[in-house]
Image: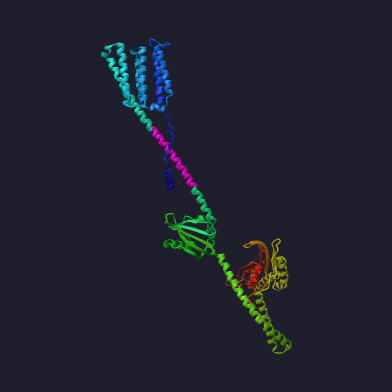
Amino acid sequence: MKNVIKNALSRIKPVKIKNRVQYMDHKTTILIMRWLIVLLVILLAGFSEGGLDFGSKNYLLAIFFFVSNMILTFVPARLFDKQWLNYVIFLSDICLVSASVYFAEGINTDFYLIYFLSIFMSSVGQNVKGTIPVAFVASLFYGWLVYHNSGPEVFSSPSFWIRLPFFFLVALFSSYWASQAAVERKKKEEEEKLNQRLKREIELATDEIVKTNQSLRYYKEYNENIMASINSGVIVVDVDGVVTTFNRGATDIFHVISAAVMGKPLDEFLRFKTISELLQRTMETGKSVHRNEMTITTFSDQQITIGISTSLLHSQTARTNGAIAIFSDLTRTKSLEERVKHSEKLAILGEMAAVMAHEIRNPLNSIAGFSQLLQSRVEESDRNRKYVDIIVNEAFRVDTLISDILDFAHQKKTIWSEVRLESLIDKVIDAKRAKAVEKNIELHKNIAGSLPAIQGDAVRLERVVLNLTNNAIEAIEDGGRIEIAATQKIGSQGPGVELTVSDNGCGIPPENIGAIFKPFFTTKQAGTGLGMAIIQKIIEEHQGQVGVESQSGQGTKFTLFLPLNKPPDAAQETARQSA
């Protein structure tokens, strides 16, 4: 703020402002004092022996004095600053006053004091050098009038010589007073000008500061809006490692409010330790870090993978002010990458399995056919019959495995149609009710309201629900509950239907949760290990998602999300089949 004020004051230039203190100018002062002299002259004439009769010398002199003052009223004020005009006025006034005293015969009265008023008037705007000549002339006229009235013996009168020095004393004191008054007035005028100038400069500086603050506020809000609009997280620290910026993206990623982090050293937070070390290393070495991946535990105790880049934060003077870290949550991206890799593996494995299945099925048909023929010809009492039965059963078991493999490597075009999940669930429950009754298991359906129809392959979707129900029945030893529920929901792909199959059976061990969708992974003695892989493949063909939640000894819940989308076009279908 000090720099702002300094810059604002440095741009201020002196401004001339009209003086607001009102003083009487030289012309006004002289005219007022002359009007006073005119009044005194008229009084002198009125009280004299000759009186102020019309047409008398006193009358004409008063008229002349009055008219001259009226004429001076119209003289420009700038001319009153001329020295010669002042001398003309003052000497004329001395002559007029002397004439008035002479014609009024007031030389022996106190009317001679009018001379002092004239001398005092001459001191206005004059110094001592300008007033003494006026006093000298006035003393000469006064001496002549006294001499003319009393004769030479007046010069021997002490009163004459006592009055005469007063002309010069009045001149000295009045000029001194006028000089002091002029100095004081000039000082006050300068102070007033200085005050007005300072006031104006303060106003200009205040306006500049207000504008600067408004500009700073605008850019601050603009910067905050940019930071808030960035989806990536941004953390800025100063040279001491104290957090100066923690934007909304960082808040969303780490699940912590910015107020809890701002103004505090970043290394105080254990969860930010790796980021703090990375920023510190950037400030120490001056080298930026690009797209470094690390695992962070958020404040909601979730482990996420972030991609982070760091760089030095420079000011306009190229001095390092700290470091900045920009990062984004890669957890979902990593999950998608794993799913893509898994899908690629499944595609390769499916192609290989399909080829192998076709190659195995040809000799298997021969084995199964001849073993059945042999079985029909061997009596049940024959001790070799059990070996023939084993051959037949195992041949059909291999055929079932091959069917699952071919189904997993399904290359047929999906038959898209409108599917009502509610009726599909009813069919599955009807098909498995008898088996559930055998194990004392309750089958429940929970449909939330009216479900919208989806686009899909009804046969393949029915097989998904049927397989999940079979697995649930097998997970329950004796007596339990299975619930098949469906509800409309908004997912990451938009609106869709969420279908769940949950049971209270033995559950899935935690170490097996991540492997149940892998081909040929099974914990069953008679299982092929392709059931869950086929389910995942069918749901992915419908652009959906599969999730599982399970706890050992408490049960398992499978969640299927099927979006309400249209079937893929021919180009998408071709790409899917080629994959």
Relative depth, front residue between 208 and 144: 144
Which portion, as a residue range, is magenta? 188-214
Q: Main secondary structure of the magenta part?
A: helix
Q: In this view, does 359 lie above or below 307?
A: below
Q: Residue lying at the far top in this picture: please name it.
A: 49
* Placement of the C terminus among the 4 image quadrants: bottom right
Q: Is residue 189 magenta?
A: yes
Residue 369 picture location, percent across and down: 71, 85
Foreground of the two, 461 or 574: 574
In the rendered structure, the answer to whether residue 52 lies left or right of residue 433 reads left
User: Is residue 22 among the parts visible in the rendering?
Assistant: yes
State the image quarter where residue 143 is shown. Answer: top left
Is residue 133 part of the magenta span, yes or no?
no
Is residue 522 visible in this depiction of the protein?
no
Q: Position of residue 72 (x, y in %)?
A: 42, 22
Question: Residue 414: x percent and y percent?
Answer: 68, 70
Residue 145 in the figure: left or right of residue 349: left
Total marks placed: 0
Q: Which residue is drawn at 48% across and 47% down?
A: 213
* Residue sitting at the far left: 156
- Which residue shows up at 39% across the image and 27% down it? 79
| Residue closest to the eye, 194 or 520 | 194
Q: Which coloring applies here?
A: rainbow
Q: Position of residue 531 (x, y in %)?
A: 65, 74
Q: In which quarter of the image is residue 126?
A: top left
Judge by depth and name the residue closer to the eye, 98 or 435.
98
What residue is drawn where x is 44% and y is 39%?
A: 200
